[in-house]
Image (cartoon, rainbow, N blue to C red):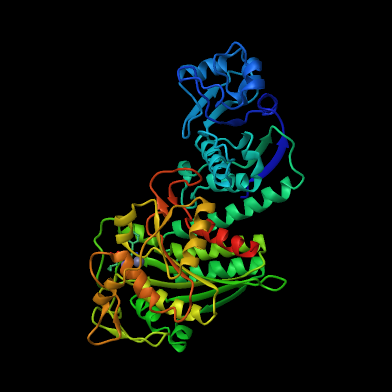
Amino acid sequence: MSLQITVRSSTPLATALAADDELVVIGCWAFAGSSAKTDKGARRGKSAATKAGKGLSEPIAELVELDARFHGAVSAYARREDFKGKREQTLRVPTFGRVPARTIVLLGLGERDAKGVTPVEARSFAGRAARMAVTEKATALVVVVPSGIDAHLRQVAEGLTLGAYRFTKYLTGDRKPKESLSKVTVALTGKAPRDAKALTELGQRIGEAVNLSRDLSNEPANELPPAALAHAAQVVARANRLKVQVFDAKEIVRRKMHLLYAVGRGSRNEPRFVHLSYSPAGKAKKRLVFVGKGITFDSGGLSIKPAAGMGEMKHDMSGAGNMVGLMAAVAALKPSVEVHAIMACAENMPDGDAYRPGDIFGSLDGKTVEIINTDAEGRLVLADALAYAKALKPDLLVNNATLTGACLVALGSGCSAFYATSEDAAAEFGAAVKEAGEQMWRMPLIEELREAMRSDVADIKHTGDRYGGSITGALFLREFIGDVKNFVHADIAGPVTTERAFSWNPKGATGHGVLSYLSLVERAART
Ligand code: BES
Ligand code: MN
Ligand code: ZN
């Protein structure tokens, strides 16, 4: 069920008075607090707020009026609890029936940058507010948006939609949440802009698109074989008038995608190849092509993985799941660029018919590949997908995959690696990631590591040294892009899931990547 988001103009006090049995979350920028040194010049909200809050040693600008209603009890309580509006700081204020709102939560936003509030800060604040509402089991939420954040209504709606997300599909009885957050009021202290409704609707659609990627990633492998993943893409295409092509196992063989077929051979669930595309109404400024790894379960195949943590490999299709969400978001945005999304879907299982170490296969590109370790299956399915993608002559080609455990060793679980074959692509991709507020770090394509992939019996081996594993993966993929100049590979193995909720992400699948790719699309349409 979709959230109902409305925007209105109101003060925190009026909001709390009108919010019948609702949870009210009030965003508060950091303030000095009574114990900290009082640098009056640097403190924001000074003049008017300070005067109005006379009697409080350190007023919270956003709360002066509300505080007065409580005879200063709110600020006294905040002081006692040492709430200073720091980032990640929260304070739950019971209202004891003084106002209709059941609970007021103060959410710290940290220092407000003099250069202005970013869209990412707005999304993060709204995400935390929505997560708070879910934790408090509230069905209705009022978010009081402080100054600065009100300039980013689209991102506020994105954050609300993303923060309210939970994967509860398989819970029954007492475990099934009886009610969920269904109504959110965004209260602005200033006037609501005229396009408030359009902005929140767009933000909500983008949030829902990312949530769709999360849903696919969280879905267990028994419920989401390659055919079901391809079906999800078809559903999105139909709902949004996008073009979609799906190749089944027979068509995959007929088209000579031998590597994709090889990986899928060990599973009863046949592989699928998906090509989604969006074209703008007018002339397209650019053509962007995205590719995603869709291993619906990665057991490792005959080079089987250890039992511990194997269940996490249901998320190994997150790169492809991202493609479905990305295209839903693109359809909502209607940018003036052409966007293609390609998904290479297979299940990697051990079986009498499974591919083996030592096997040699041809590929769509023509190169032959010697199989070393059947657990390095991602780069194989992607090699065929990239060979298909290069024929589309992209201005920018972006691959995204949960490709290597080595990437987690290198950058930790909260940051992706990205590799680029041109400085232009690197700069553009890096800027998009920053704008989206995701964590990705550029890594080098170290040519020396290619040596270890030299094969005596085929054109190339598909794995190299044990060290530098994420880099070798990227180097292998690069072999299949032909003369495409601008290629970026994002190894998203870490951040596609999180063990700890943060910002706009709840526990589990995050949909990490979608927002960055969407920024890339928007930037391309802007120039
Ligand atoms: N899907 C895994 C990578 C992975 C590991 C993703 C942990 C998320 C968390 C991939 O298919 C894989 O198994 N890679 C191997 C490659 C190796 C055999 C060259 C790896 O990283 O160990
Ligand atoms: Mn694997
Ligand atoms: Zn894998």
Give the x, y percent position of residue 229: 49, 68
Q: In the image, residue 405 lies at what x, y percent?
A: 31, 60
Q: Position of residue 379 (x, y in %)?
A: 36, 72
Q: Is residue 358 above or below residue 439?
A: below
Above or below for 84 versus 344? above
Q: Quadrant of residue 374?
A: bottom left
- Residue 406: image x %, image y %? 29, 61
| Front position in the image: 226 or 450 | 450
Residue 98 vs residue 187, the one in the foreground: 187
Q: Is residue 357 left or right of residue 73?
A: left
Residue 401 seen in this snapshot: yes
Nearer to me, 248 or 331: 331
Q: Is residue 221 left or right of residue 470?
A: right
Picture mark count: 0
Q: Quadrant of the C terminus?
A: bottom right
Residue positioned most to the right: 194
Is residue 188 shown left or right of residue 430? right
Quadrant for ligand 1?
A: bottom left
Q: Residue at x 72, y 51 (%)?
A: 198
In-image side of 44 versus 372 (left or right): right
Which of the 4 image quarters holds residue 303? bottom left
Q: Residue at x 48, y 75 (%)?
A: 485
Residue plotted at (30% across, 78% down): 354
> Is the residue 157 above or below the residue 442 in the image?
above
- Residue 67, image quadrant: top right
Q: Can residue 213 be seen at all in this image of the molecule?
A: no
